[in-house]
Every structure is written in structure tokens, then in C-alpha cells.
Image (spheres, coloured by chain):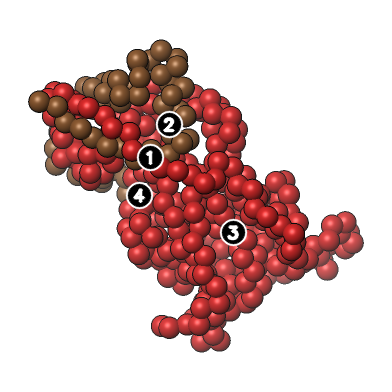
Chain colours: A red, B brown
Amino acid sequence: MDRPVIAEFVLQPGCGKAIEMRRGMILRIEQIEGGQCVDFNCFNLHDYKEFFHTGRTRHMHGLHPSKGNFLWSAPPRERPMMYIMEDTAGTNDILYPRCSGFLYEYHYGLATHTNCHDMQAEAQREYGLTPDDVHDSFNFFMHTGIDSRGRPFIARQKSKKGDYVELLAVIDVLAVPNVCGADIMATSDFAFKPIRVTLLQGSEADLDTVPDWPKMANQRTPDDFRQKKIKADRELRRDTSYRSEFTNVPIRVTDLSVTLNDTEAAALDALKQTGLYGEGDGEVLRYVFFSWWIENFMQGPKHFEDLKT
Amino acid sequence: MVKLVNIGLNQQQLELIDKTVTRGIAADRNALMRKALTEYAAKHPPQGGAEAAERKKEVH
């Protein structure tokens, strides 16, 4: 269906964007190249204390919500904020928390690194929110699972060029997508790719497709609180003086040329033939290198599919 | 005979690679990549389609 385009953004690696959405608008998040995780959060545009909650969404729809599911707000509000109208890849995650500066410092010894917490914080700073206001994200296109021993793992991406999700705003929201900052974890196959985000005008017909949801007395609003006066200014307003300052942006990719002898070339070719590590020689060697690095040097739990045997 | 492989890496990934070299794990970037490939291939010997199919099945 052709819908009027309100705005279009290309999110470059290392970046995110806060986007105002009125009820009935649709946000399309699209793979330009494929294989890129997109972290996402949203807030009630008129009350930032109501925000997307991975826990309630996980409870309602499981670990991998997809088309036909909602993004629920946190207790005690607990109502749908957005509706997943379309999902062409079908691999999403709400098991893993957002990556953060701590993780890269702890796991890899890198003190300054792109990470989803800081990108979310930097993007929503445009609306006066602080790093303390970031919440766990909906990880679109992230391919995860739980192994036979109950441990979560991150698997190779399934999303391809042109795959997209469409999110219908069920209430007015501030939507915040960011290109996941994990380039040395398996999340996006060890390579950043840009993402296209398109804000579309929806219609009443779109809203009519949203299934009904439970309406319960316990879906409380501040009117139900004993303490009705909330200290903060809850309306989200854009700061017109905002200029983004994302960490390590721009991300610059250069080629590293590696010379392999016959034995090494044969080993690389054999790994490539499995289809588990990518397609081109460079892609496979990059995947193998970081897999090896994680096995040998990463501190803490590995969260890596290849290591679960 | 040698084979030249070009790997696209960003500045953050190169930082990790250079820090690993500085730790003395290998003499330079090139040697580090070759060491990783050799050790990884030895630890995860490819078993072809059957292995791939089994591991893909486990993912779902």
C-alpha cells in the first residue's frame, strides 16, 4: 500500500534518531544491505514515564515478537504503544539487554566504543532525556536463541537487503531507533551497515487492523496513583539547539589485506564451504577472526552460538 | 602460491586488532589474522553440509 511519506532518514553506523510519531503513523525500519540489528525504544510522547517494556512484551509475546504483536509499556501502565504491522525477516529479540560502554570495556578492554545505550541516550537527548532514561530495547532483526543448557546465544543474521518491519503507533510516541553498536559481537555479523527509517502517514484503516487488547482496571495511569503529582515535566519537547555527538562517528571502513599461504587458504575455503560464516573470503575471515577472539580473550560470558557445544 | 584476502574493518575493530597485537599475541595485523584462522579452523574442523544443517537446526 502506498502511504504518504512524512520523513525519511538513513541512520549511519554509530547513530540513532528520535522521531515524533502521532497515533496512526507508521515507522518502517528497513535493511539497506542486510544483516544489521536495530535497537529500538519508545516513550509516550506526552509522558516519558510511560515507556516500552521488554519484560511485559516478553511475557505477552515470547522472546521473538513479530508481525501481529505489540510493543507494551511498563507496569503499571501496561498497554500497547506500537503494533508490528509487518515483519519480512521474522527474527527479532527481546531477550538481550542493550549493549553499553561497560560491556565493551569489560569484555574487550575498549573504553570508548559505539554502544546502544549511549546511542539511545544521545538520540533522545534531543528531547531533554538523560542517559538514566534509556530502557532495554527491542532488538529488531537480532537473531538469538537459548541452547539446550538454558544459555542465551547470538546467531548469524537472517535479515537480507530490503527486509523491513513496520510499526504502527497506537498512541503518540517518541520512537528511537539506532544502528546497533556491536561490531565485535556476533549481533550484526561483525560489520556495521546503514539502516533506512521511513515515517509514513497511516490511516484509520490501518488502526482498524490492530487487534483488540485486554482492557483491565490494573492498567493504571497517574490518575490512579495515590501520589498524583509527579515531579518531572513529562511532556517531551524537541530541543532546537540539539546537535548530535555520537561516539566514534563517522565509522570508517578500510580494507586490511591478509596474505594466506596454501594451507591457510584451504582452511578458509573449507570454512566458507560450510555456509556458516558468510559468503566472500573477507566476510568469512572477519567472522572467523572475531569468533576466535571471543573464544580466546573475551572476558565474561561469551553469548556466542558457535561456542555452545 | 599465496592468496590475498581483503577484509573490511572499521576503526573500532582495528583498535581491537592492534591492542591484541600490542599484547604480543602476534607480530602484526596480518600475522594475527592468519593465527586466528589457523587456530579456529583446527578447533572447528568443517564437516560440510551435515554440520551446517545440524547447527542451523539448533539455532531455531
Which residue lies at the image location 74% right of the left edge and 59% below the top edge?
Answer: A241
Query: Is B51 placed above or below A197 here?
Result: above
Residue A269: name its quadrant.
top left
Q: Residue tagged by mark 2?
A: B14
In this view, the mark in front (3 or 4) = 3
Q: Which chain does tag 3 point to?
A: A
Measure how far apart labels 2 and 3 are at the Cα level.
Answer: 26 Å
Measure how far apart labels 2 and 4 are at the Cα level.
Answer: 22 Å
Mark 1: few, some, or many residues within 10 Å (few <14, many ≥20)? few
In the image, which disc is placed on residue A17? 3
The N terminus of chain A appears in which quarter of the rendering?
A: bottom left
In the image, which disc is placed on residue A34? none
Q: Residue tagged by mark 4?
A: A157
Residue A190: name its quadrant.
top left
Looking at the rendered structure, the secondary structure element under dot 2 is: helix
In this view, the mark in front (2 or 3) = 2
Q: Position of residue A254 (x, y in %)?
A: 38, 40
In the image, which disc is placed on residue A254? 1
Give the mark, 3 or 4, whose residue is nearer the N terminus: 3
Which residue lies at the image location 54% right of the left edge and 29% below the top edge?
Answer: A110
- Kind of residue indicated by mark 1: Thr
In the orientation shown, which residue stands out farthest toward the top?
B24
Q: Position of residue B6 (x, y in %)?
A: 27, 37
Mark 4: few, some, or many residues within 10 Å (few <14, many ≥20)? many
- Kind of residue indicated by mark 3: Lys
